[in-house]
Image (cartoon, coloured by chain):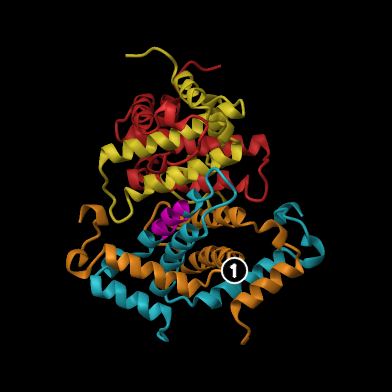
Chain colours: A orange, B cyan, C red, D yellow
Amino acid sequence: MTSEPVLETLRAFMAERDWQQFHSPENLAKSINIEAGELLECYQWDSDADRDEVAGELADVLTYALLLADRLDLDPEQIIRAKLERTGRKYPVEKAKGRSTKYDRL
Amino acid sequence: MTSEPVLETLRAFMAERDWQQFHSPENLAKSINIEAGELLECYQWDSDADRDEVAGELADVLTYALLLADRLDLDPEQIIRAKLERTGRKYPVEKAKGRSTKYDRL
Amino acid sequence: MTSEPVLETLRAFMAERDWQQFHSPENLAKSINIEAGELLECYQWDSDADRDEVAGELADVLTYALLLADRLDLDPEQIIRAKLERTGRKYPVEKAKGRSTKYDRL
Amino acid sequence: MTSEPVLETLRAFMAERDWQQFHSPENLAKSINIEAGELLECYQWDSDADRDEVAGELADVLTYALLLADRLDLDPEQIIRAKLERTGRKYPVEKAKGRSTKYDRL
């Protein structure tokens, strides 16, 4: 059991390997796409997937996403909340309820 | 200021709109890819990008990633730590330090 | 040397393996993303990449793209030309020349 | 009706706008991912999609794929055939027929 915040663990892991030099925002954005593709591969031919495999690929997406946030001094929770507010305005409950339609066609 | 965990906020937002019905694991994996592509678009022609735009797109990636974890009953921090351990074994410090080479060529 | 059109070769390859059953448009769209991610991996940490590796990954992207076009009865050259015409209207030479700016900001 | 090869049309379009300067292999690989994501968006919540929209997004994927091939002096048909041969060896008909299993698990 660890009580160290996960971001600290990630930073230490990268520092130990001297990998921050590769983690430009652009490279991290590419890495998120690469790992997102590997995650999607779990569902390539089937809507079911092995949960453990998904966990491993999703972890990679999350890791690079947290590293990009850290690199740009962005707080993950804060940007999620801020975006959710904007999304809420584009998709008001009374119009969007139960529909997957894009906002510009609602 | 909110003290509600961000996952609770996300769940309430989706429930209010009755959107969980669209959030199959496969659809969430597709959504992560779509949003990762929009994030990459910030860096399409340039290694610099507008920080606010990046924040918005990164928030979308994180949102769908948290929803997928939630849907599969996975703890984001736990899967990140578990994957980091496996990565650590594939990239021992003494071999990987300062190198971006893939493990099977180290 | 072959003179058989490449689409015929692709169709025969898939029919021989009875793989068309997996090639729904949605699965092909996912596959294009997955292969695009593998292509991007060639450039993950570096703007240079091994040409042979790129060729192999680009071939996968093209293969699935041709299969999707075939599945939807779309002619690849025709849709490229049609889209280019629309792009040309959004990016008139006099405004877009030498600039990578997106059309809605030109 | 045009009889000019589509690659010539693409090259002329880009040259007219002086856009080749942005088309480094890396930027084209990113662009393929971005457009692949937009294509996938057609199938985000549904396995059906509007054929015209798909045509437009697929055209973008193909366009950037052809530009990348051109940039690296690769012949699209030739690399597709070469890759298909390698795939054929990894997935021999007698083992792969009617199965979507990945080769390392066949």
- C57 or A92, which lies in front? A92
Q: List x then y, in percent, for residue C10.
A: 44, 30
Q: Which residues are magenta?
A: B29-38
Identify whether D67 is placed above or below D42.
Answer: above
Within-10-Å neighbours for mark 1: few <14, some 14–19, many 20+: some
Residue C16 visible (yes or no) = no
- Tell me the element at label 1: helix
Q: Is residue D47 left or right of residue A52?
A: left
* Residue in the picture at 53% in, 27% down: D18
Q: List x then y, in percent, for residue D8.
A: 48, 18
- C45 or A43, which lies in front? C45
Identify whether B73 is placed above or below C75.
Answer: below
Res. B68 image quadrant: bottom left
Answer whether residue B59 is magenta in the image.
no
Q: List x then y, in percent, for residue B90.
A: 70, 64
The residue furthest left is A94
The answer for which chain carries disc 1 is A
Res. C13 image quadrant: top left
Res. D82 image quadrant: top right
Q: Which quarter of the image is occupied by the N terminus of chain D?
A: top left
Q: Which residue is mark 1?
A: A70
* Residue in the picture at 43% in, 31% down: C95
Amino acid type for the residue under numbered disc 1: Asp
